[in-house]
Amino acid sequence: MAYLFTSESVSEGHPDKVADQISDAILDEYLRQDECSHVAVETMVTSNNVILAGETLAKAQVDHEAVVRKVIRQIGYTYPDLNFAADSVCVTDHIHEQSKDISEGIKGQGAGDQCAGDQGAGDQGMMFGFACREHDSSFMPLPLMYAHQLVQELAQIRKHESIMPYLRPDSKSQVTVQYDRTGTIPQRIHTIVIATQHDADVEQDKIRADIKAHLLPRVIHPRFNDNEFILYVNRTGQFVIGGPHADAGLTGRKIIVDTYGGRGAHGGGAFSGKDPSKVDRSAAYAARYVAKNLVAAGLAEMVEIQLAYVIAKPEPVSIHVNSSGTVKYGLSDSDLTEIIQETFDLSPAGIISDLRLKQPIYQKTAAYGHFGRNNFPWEQLDAVDKLRVYAKSAAA
């Protein structure tokens, strides 16, 4: 019997992703001026309005409104008729100074300021990391990676090419993959769904034909594109009214798109707008880093890792590993847990230092997934050799 699994993605012009990118762009600007900034910024977007809220603690002066307009312009909302445009939106700013209760908690015992090394977790919570061997070198689930790449390529075509001049910023994708009976080996693509905002004067048949001719061959591997799969394009008949004018957007409302498309678990905390002292973000990145390196080292075919923290305590209160029975070399999931403890510093300060998380790199994460793109520090495979050494020792 066929095993089907589906994941979705959304473009940078989707209302929730607009909000995420604004929040992370503001974070980046604080980090650019002061790498020790503490930032937690939320954004809401709707018809010609952007509302900012949250708190900061930093030696920086950031023009929030200027950042907002720059991000909206970069995304491509420059058309007044879309009722959400960079030059005309009203920006309401409610960002204020961070609570002293929070700032004291994350300093850690004996720390002198918010940039001190002895840093406790910024909150309680559990975070997950996941990796598998489905998609080339990304170690990510195949349905999600194809869903990301479809909307990302649509944006590239819209911004840099003239072959589909009617495209507008808002779009969504969904990909269903058929697996073997074990649910681990992709066999074929079953269904692709594309919804893309467009000008009013274009026929839907034209959009569908262009997607088949220009978009799919750039993204879908020939061994899957040769197969017959179901393709749905703009199933409502048209998609002219879109973006924040059609649907309000909020920071942190696409956490499954941001992570593993439903294949791996999620602890519930959003990423965007949060500096790395918040373990919602940094520990999720660390868990992905550990999982990817374990799979790349050949210790398992699939790994899910849970980390749990309590506010103001540096070390995780628990580490849980689930390899779904794919662990190798006679090891167990408990052995993998011990190897992780020997190999990685999973305190907030250790994570921030090892993954270089004080850089202004976060706006780039806020669309098309936080994982699976090799230009981020947590996607590097620099722990593989060390893991293999520990694995041989544990197996012996």
Image (cartoon, grey):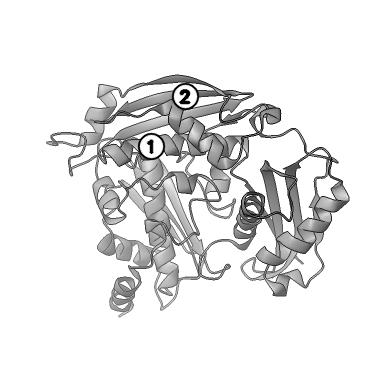
Query: Which quadrant holds the N terminus?
Result: bottom right
Residue 213 x %, y %: 78, 63
Question: Callout 2: helix, strand or loop?
Answer: strand
| Residue 320 in sight here | no
Residue situated in front as seen by the camera: 249 or 316: 249
Q: Which residue is mark 1?
A: 27
* Residue 327, numbered label: none
Answer left or right for 168 relative to 114.
right
Residue situated in front as seen by the camera: 210 or 283: 210
Residue 2 x %, y %: 75, 65
The residue carrying pointer 1 sits among few (fewer than 14), some (14 to 19) or many (20 or more) residues within 10 Å by Cα, namely many
Amino acid on which disc 2 is placed: Leu
Q: Image point 73% across, 56% down: which residue?
A: 163
Instruction: List the single residue furthest toward the front.
Output: 162
| Residue 388 in sight here | yes
Q: Which residue is mark 2?
A: 52
Answer left or right for 353 relative to 50.
left
Q: Image point 29% across, 51% down: which residue?
A: 351
Answer left or right for 254 relative to 297.
right
Asked if the residues shown at circle 1 and circle 2 are in contact, with their CB atoms under 8 angstroms apart, the answer is no
Amino acid on which disc 1 is placed: Leu
Question: Callout 1: helix, strand or loop?
Answer: helix
Residue 283 x %, y %: 37, 48
The first of marks 1 and 2 along the sequence is 1
Above or below, comparing residue 115 to residue 7 in the picture: above
Query: Which quadrant holds the C terminus?
Result: bottom left
Q: Image point 71% across, 29% down: which residue?
A: 81
Residue 262 x %, y %: 59, 51
Answer left or right for 236 relative to 259.
right
